[in-house]
């Protein structure tokens, strides 16, 4: 695998390596805005490497991004998820800023987003568009989707997030290099957030104000298709990461329904009404399915625990090596 090295560390003291920051910008047909995004982040983080990840844009995104001084990486597989997977695997840095190329997130907030990760207080800072102080200019359909998906995730995973899907984040190397990501499309933000939560990473939210896309710039979201993708992502992560609640819950529902029918028939029996043998066979079958679902939940829950233990030991060497990196003092306020 090719490591896309950014901003080679300069030695300030023997044995010390400078912290490197990479700004990662996924872009598909963003020729109108990408130069401004690159310029704004260059101004705020002069020493950072700015990498635009393009997906065969049909407009001049690649050219414009290069002219603006960004490194450009071409990812052949279409989809924001594919691009983010490539970014996380191929870019080597100590701290990562991820931001959309449509000039809707404020570069002026980047220091505030970086601060908690650089100070070691957080593993990921999410630029939240949905806190009271944010005053974001959402498209109404996006806002409804965001509120629903957030509620769904908070309920299923016991989280208290205000923004699940923000495209503006700062992350440590430890987090970026240890999340296995598989989403191809717009489910990627949900995947990053939920997988980070479930691995016990520290998430902090900082309010940011989302601007509307400028005139002439078009959204890449297809509301129904991408909405269903995001819902599917949250659902499958719930199944995979909370199997006892998922399968056990389903099993209890089936058992509860079976019990209700048995009671109802029992009452009918008391009233001397006959019931046929096939009903009893069906009820037996349903009770077995319910018990099986609970058993599957228990088995997967135990397996998950064991995998978590294995992952814990895999992560230790990475965490130890990231502790050695020297931190740029200009980021300490
Ligand atoms: N490289 C690449 N980038 C993509 C792809 N799809 C979306 N993006 C980029 O991902 C970012 C987010 O996409 P947007 O269309 O802005 O989605 P959004 O921010 O949720 O919604 P709007 O801003 O309302 O359009 C933008 O910078 C897009 O250019 C893709 O398939 N490939
Ligand atoms: Mg956008």
Image: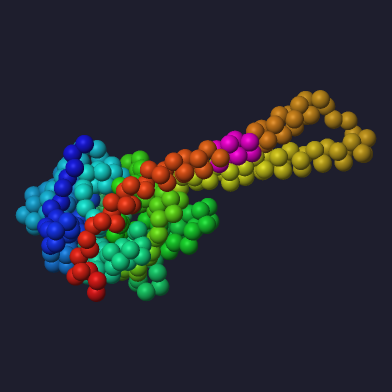
Instruction: Specify whether 209 is left or right of 232.
Output: left
Magenta-drawn stretch contains 294 = yes
Residue at (16, 47) in percent of width and height: 5
- Give the overall secondary structure of the magenta segment: helix
The one of 193 and 96 positioned closer to us in this rendering: 96
The one of 282 and 216 positioned closer to us in this rendering: 282
The one of 319 and 302 positioned closer to us in this rendering: 319
Residue at (58, 43) in percent of width and height: 244
Which region is colored magenta? 293-301
Instruction: Specify whether 109 is left or right of 227.
Output: left
Locate the C terminus by quadrant: bottom left
Q: Is residue 89 visible?
A: yes
Horizontal and vertical percent for residue 268? 87, 38
Residue 168's image quarter? bottom left
Residue at (25, 40) in percent of width and height: 78
The one of 265 and 197 positioned closer to us in this rendering: 197
């Amino acid at each position: 695998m090719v490591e896309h090295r950014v901003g080679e560390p300069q030695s300030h003291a023997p044995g010390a390596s400078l912290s490197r920051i990479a700004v990662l910008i996924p872009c598909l047909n963003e020729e109108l805005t990408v130069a401004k995004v690159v310029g704004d982040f260059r101004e705020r983080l002069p020493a950072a490497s700015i990498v635009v990840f393009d997906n065969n844009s049909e407009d001049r995104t690649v050219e414009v991004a290069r002219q603006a001084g960004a490194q450009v990486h071409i990812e052949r597989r279409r989809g924001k998820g594919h691009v983010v997977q490539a970014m996380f695997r191929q870019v080597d840095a100590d701290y990562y800023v991820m931001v959309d190329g449509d000039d809707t997130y404020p570069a002026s907030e980047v220091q505030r987003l970086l601060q908690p990760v650089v100070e070691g207080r957080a593993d990921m800072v999410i630029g939240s568009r949905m806190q009271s102080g944010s005053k974001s200019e959402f498209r109404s359909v996006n806002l409804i989707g965001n509120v629903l998906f957030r509620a769904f995730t908070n309920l299923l995973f016991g989280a208290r997030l205000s923004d699940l899907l923000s495209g503006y984040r700062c992350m440590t190397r430890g987090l970026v290099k240890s999340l296995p990501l598989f989403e191809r499309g717009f489910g990627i933000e949900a995947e990053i957030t939920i997988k980070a939560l479930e691995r016990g990473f520290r998430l902090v939210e900082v309010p940011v104000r989302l601007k509307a896309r400028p005139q002439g710039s078009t959204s890449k979201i297809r509301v129904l298709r991408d909405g269903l993708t995001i819902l599917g992502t949250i659902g499958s992560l719930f199944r995979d990461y909370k199997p006892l609640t998922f399968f056990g819950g389903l099993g209890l529902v089936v058992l509860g329904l079976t019990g209700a029918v048995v009671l109802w028939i029992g009452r009918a029996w008391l009233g001397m009404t006959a019931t046929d043998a096939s009903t009893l066979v069906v009820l037996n079958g349903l009770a077995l399915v319910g018990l099986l679902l609970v058993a599957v939940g228990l088995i997967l829950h135990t397996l998950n625990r064991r995998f978590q233990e294995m992952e814990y030991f895999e992560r230790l060497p990475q965490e130890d090596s990231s502790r050695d990196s020297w931190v740029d003092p200009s980021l300490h306020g």
